[in-house]
């Protein structure tokens, strides 16, 4: 069953994110950071999070009608809390400080982009992958965008993420550009609904 996520789902969403996106910047910031972030996202009305639940939560999709505005709203609502969490982890890995600063710069620059609707994260538990869960979540997410008058949206993933690049191409996304972030090359895809 696919349903809208609530605040009670936050610990599980963070766990799935940690497991499915190992090594990625937000994951290296740890569970506490991710839980804080998802809780804050869920408190904003522009946030869309659907999850697939059978006996347990198997995966989720998260995006927004206006992602740059959402990100700015969340980061500025508790700027010092986020700064503290990044600084705490940054003592162990100074590279995280640079990546944190890149996120701020990136969110500032993306304000200027014309495509505001965005799929920010899709993650399915490793043992549940390739069972069509991601595709079903995407379908519901797109239906929700369409219902709210959106007919064009974007998503980005690292060029090294083979599964995600296959997944987006299979679902008719078209590559619209590339960029560098967190010391990696990324592909940006767009899709007309
Ligand atoms: C990307 C992801 C969400 C896809 O979810 P899923 O439930 O496994 O996807 P589906 O079963 O609906 O698969 C659909 C398509 O995805 C692609 N895909 C999924 N797993 C793949 C794999 N291991 N290798 C290559 N392609 C894969 C294929 O194109 C597949 O179509 P096919 O089976 O006809 O070849 C999932 O692999 C995942 O959670 N990955 C880790 C998190 C991540 O990287 N998210 C994207 C960046 S935010």
Image (tube, helix red, strand yellow):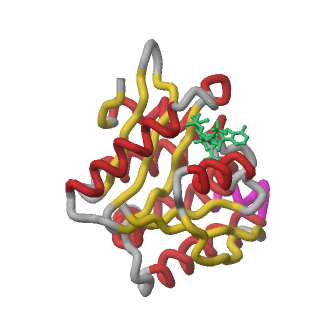
109 left or right, relative to 179: left
Question: Residue visible at 51% across and 26% down?
Answer: 58
42 left or right, relative to 94: left
How many labels sit on residues? 0
Question: Residue visible at 37% across and 66% down?
Answer: 117
Q: Position of residue 143 (x, y in %)?
A: 30, 48
Quadrant in which the N terminus appears: top left
Q: Position of residue 26 (x, y in %)?
A: 62, 53
74 left or right, relative to 45: right
Does residue 41 lie above or below 180 as drawn? above
In the rendered structure, does residue 164 fall within the stretch colored magenta?
no
Does residue 58 lie above or below 70 as drawn? above
Quadrant in which the C terminus appears: bottom left
139 left or right, relative to 156: left
Question: Residue visible at 43% across and 63% down?
Answer: 118
Q: Which residues are magenta?
A: 87-94
Q: Position of residue 75 (x, y in %)?
A: 43, 66
Does residue 92 lie above or below 10 as drawn? below
């Amino acid at each position: 069953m696919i349903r809208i996520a609530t605040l009670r789902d936050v610990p599980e969403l963070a766990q799935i994110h940690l497991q499915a996106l190992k090594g990625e910047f937000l994951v290296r910031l740890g569970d506490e950071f991710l839980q804080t972030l998802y809780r804050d996202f869920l408190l904003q009305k522009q946030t869309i999070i659907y999850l697939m639940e059978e006996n347990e939560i198997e995966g989720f999709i998260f995006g927004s009608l206006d992602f740059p505005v959402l990100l700015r709203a969340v980061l500025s609502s508790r700027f010092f809390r986020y700064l503290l969490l990044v600084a705490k982890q940054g003592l162990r890995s100074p590279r995280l400080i640079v990546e944190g600063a890149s996120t701020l710069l990136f969110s500032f620059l993306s304000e200027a982009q014309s495509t505001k609707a965005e799929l920010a994260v899709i993650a399915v538990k490793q043992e549940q992958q390739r069972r069509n869960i991601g595709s079903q979540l995407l379908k519901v997410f797109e239906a929700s965008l369409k219902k709210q008058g959106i007919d064009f949206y974007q998503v980005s993933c690292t060029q090294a993420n083979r599964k995600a690049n296959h997944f987006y191409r299979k679902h008719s996304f078209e590559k619209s550009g590339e960029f560098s972030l967190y010391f990696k090359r990324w592909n940006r895809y767009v899709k007309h609904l």
